[in-house]
Amino acid sequence: MAQLSYTAKLDSSEGLSRHFTITVPAAEVDKAYANAVEKLALTMKLPGFRPGHVPAKVVREKAGEQLAQEVAEQLMQAALNLTVAEHKFNIAGQPHVHAAGHAADDHGHHAHHIVATEGQDFAFTAALEIFPEFEPQGFENLSLEKPEAEPTEELVTVALNRLGEQLQTFEAKEGKAAKGDRVTMTGQGFADDKAFPGGKLEDFKVVIGSGSLIPGFEDGLIGTKAGDEMDVQVTFPADYHAKELAGKPAVFKLKIDAIEAAKAEALTDASAKQFGFDNLEALKDVLKKGAVRDLNMASEQQVKRQLLDALETANNGFDLPQGLVAAEHQALWRAQLNELRQKGLPMEALGDDIEKVVSELKPLAERRVRLGLTLAAIAKKHQISVQNADIEQAVAEQVQSAGPRGAQVVEYFSKPQNRQQLVGPLLEDKVTAWVMSKAKITTKQVDARTLLGELN
C-alpha cells in the first residue's frame, strides 16, 4: 500500500479542522480486492473444497460484504496515512470518515460502514483536526506563594475522636436530645414545596454535632424527644453536589423515632490496641504524622493550582482541538456518574436539568486540554520526557500502596497498554516539577484546618 495511487482534495481548512475528499482509482481498488481474496482463500473452509483451494469466484460470492468492508478499511487507512504524511500534519484524535456524498453523523461513521466496489473508484471524505502550533508562555520566573501549617493538638484530637466514634456505643435515653446524642428519625425533605430526590429518610441515624449533615440540620434536632413530629428549616450550601438544591432553603418534615446517649468511653491504651497499636501514645504519634502528611499534600496541591492557573492565563491564545475537548468532557461526566454510584445516589441528585449539569463541565474540559497541550509544549521545548525508570517507580509505588491487592496491581501493569496510561500523569508531574524549580516561591503560614480544606 506504500505506493498507493490516490488523490486528496482539501475541501476546507478552518482553524484546526481539515476536510478532505480522497479518491482511490478503480485499478487500485481491484488490486486491493485481488490481494484480499487471495489472503482469505488461504483460510476459508467450505464443504467440497480443500483448505487453501477455494476458488476466487467462490470467495467473492461467500464473503462479498466482508471483502467490501475490509478493502475499504485498508484503502482508507493507507490513503489517510499518506495524506497526513504528505501535509506533515500532527493530528489530534482519530479522523472521522464517511462515504463521499453521504453526510456524517455527529460522531462520523465508522470505517466498517463504508464499502469499496470492484471496478469502481473508491471515494470517501475525512474530517480531522491537527494540534495547534504555539510557543509556550509564562513558565519561567513564576512567583508563587506556598501555604504552610504546623499540625496542632486539635487536629490530633479530632482524628482521635473520629476513631473513637467507631468504637462508640449508645443506649436509650429518656428526655430531650442534646449534642453528642444519636437521633433516629423518619421523614422527607421539601424544596419549593416539592419533595426532592434523595430527601427521604427512613430509620436514619445521626449524632448531633458530628457535622455529617448540612449546616443547621443537627442543631435543629437539639431539644427533641422520641415521638416528636417537627420541621427542621435548613439552607443547602452554595456548593452542594445537587445543583438544583445548591443555595436553596428547604424544610425536613420529621418524626423522631428514638434518642440515644453515647456511653462515656474515653480512648485508652486498651482501645488503641483494637486499632493495632501498642498504646494510646503510639496511636497519637501515627495520627500526628498523618496530619503532617496531609498538610504537606494540601500545600503542594495549592501551589500546583497556582502554577496551573498562571500557565492557563499565559497560554490562552491558541485554538483547542474540539475532538480532544469532547473526549475530556465525556470522561468528566463519566467520573461524576461513577462518584454518584459510589455514594449510592440516583442521577436525580444532580438536579432536574441534567443537560445543564453536563454543559457546566465543559469549561473544566477545556482547561484540562489547554493545560495538557501547554505542558506537552514545555516538555518538547526543554526535552523533558518519561523514562522506563519513571514508569517502574510509579508502578512500584502503586503496588506498595495497594497492600494485599499488590499482586493484582502487578498483573494489571504487566500489560503495555495499562503501563502507557501512566505516561500522561507522569509527564505532567515532571514538567510541573521543572517549572516549580524555576519559580520564585515564598512561604506563608496559615491555619492548619483552613489548609486541610484544600484536600476536600
Image: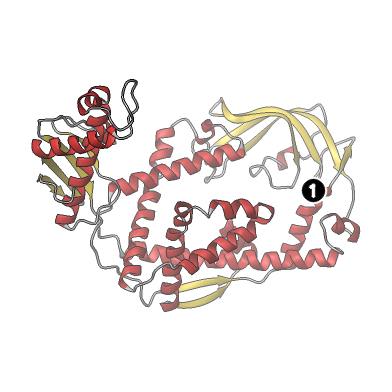
Q: Quadrant of residue 160?
A: bottom right
| x, y percent for residue 452 | 61, 61
| x, y percent for residue 62 | 27, 23
Work out whether residue 313 or residue 103 is closer to the camera in this orientation and state it. 103
Q: Is residue 326 visible?
A: yes
**Tag 1 secondary structure:** helix
Q: Is residue 285 above or below residue 424?
A: below
Work out whether residue 108 or residue 137 is closer to the camera in this orientation and state it. 108
Q: Is residue 247 above or below residue 153?
A: above
The residue depicted at 38 percent of the width and 71 percent of the height is: 384
Work out whether residue 313 or residue 341 is closer to the camera in this orientation and state it. 341
Q: Is residue 420 left or right of residue 236?
A: left
Q: Is residue 106 left or right of residue 277?
A: left
Q: Is residue 254 above or below residue 17?
A: above
The residue depicted at 68 percent of the width and 65 percent of the height is: 291
Q: Is residue 267 visible?
A: no
The residue wearing badge 1 is 166
Q: Quadrant of the C terminus?
A: bottom right
The residue depicted at 30 percent of the width and 63 percent of the height is: 315
| x, y percent for residue 449 | 64, 62
Q: Quadrant of residue 240?
A: top right
The residue depicted at 71 percent of the width and 41 percent of the height is: 218
Q: How many marks?
A: 1
Q: Quadrant of residue 217?
A: top right
Amino acid carrying label 1: it is Gln
| x, y percent for residue 335 | 49, 44
Q: Residues within 10 Å of mark 1 (few under 14, many from 20)?
A: few
Colour pattern: secondary structure
